[in-house]
Image (spheres, rainbow, N blue to C red):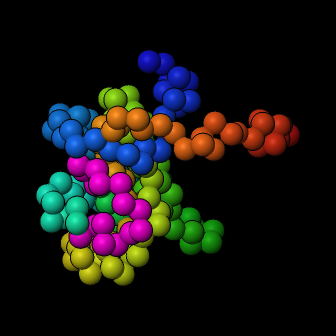
Amino acid sequence: MDFASLSARRYSLRKFSGQPVEPEKLELILKAAQNAPTAHNNQPQRIFVLQSPEALEKADGCTPCHFHPPVMLIIANDPAASWKREYDGKEYGEIDAAIVVTQMMLQAADLGLGTTYIGLFDPARLHAAFPELDGLTPIALLPVGYPAEGARPARLHDQRKSLEELVKYL
């Protein structure tokens, strides 16, 4: 599928089947994260792969978004590793992590898998549940899996502002 079709067709999946994600597909998604551009190529993203029922249940306790995927990724930023803009000290780790998540979502869609970007979580609960996050800033949860029977985009998915509203040529 060409990129324009892929980006138009991809949607936030909120209903996952119980089918496991093949290790080779998960590896391709993680490679897409590794290949993502980051400020000054500092690569401050840190990714945690949750697959065990215990880990998935712990993550579920940190967010009101319960989609029950077979795989959940925690994408975090290491502020000690991220680039800071010299003019004002702006830290780019969160931006880098968002780019990483986008690449993973598009790779997953290309493989026939669904994802949804979850930003609604309690960072303190996530840190308590996963001490491995110590020193890191969690940016997103990313459930990954196959669409369940009857899964479809949310009703507002196809509503897009016009290019005229979004773009200015100067």
| Residue 170 position (above or below residue 38) | above
Q: Nearer the viewer, residue 93 or 14?
A: 14
Q: What residue is rendered at 60% in x and 43% in y? A: 155
What residue range appears in magenta? 58-72
Residue 114 in sight here: yes
Quarter holding the N terminus is top left
Going by the image, does 105 lie left or right of 111? right
Residue 80 in sight here: no
Q: Position of residue 129 (x, y in %)?
A: 24, 76
Is residue 114 rendered magenta in the image?
no
Q: What residue is rendered at 38% in x and 46% in y? A: 15
- Quarter residue 164 falls in: top right
Q: What residue is rendered at 41% in x and 62% in y? A: 65
Give the farthest residue toward the top.
Answer: 1
Q: Nearer the viewer, residue 154 or 167?
A: 154
> Which SS type dominates the magenta stretch?
loop
Going by the image, does 120 lie left or right of 16? right
Q: Position of residue 18 (x, y in %)?
A: 22, 43
| Residue 51 position (above or below residue 20) | below
Q: Position of residue 151 (x, y in %)?
A: 42, 38
- Quarter residue 31 falls in: top left
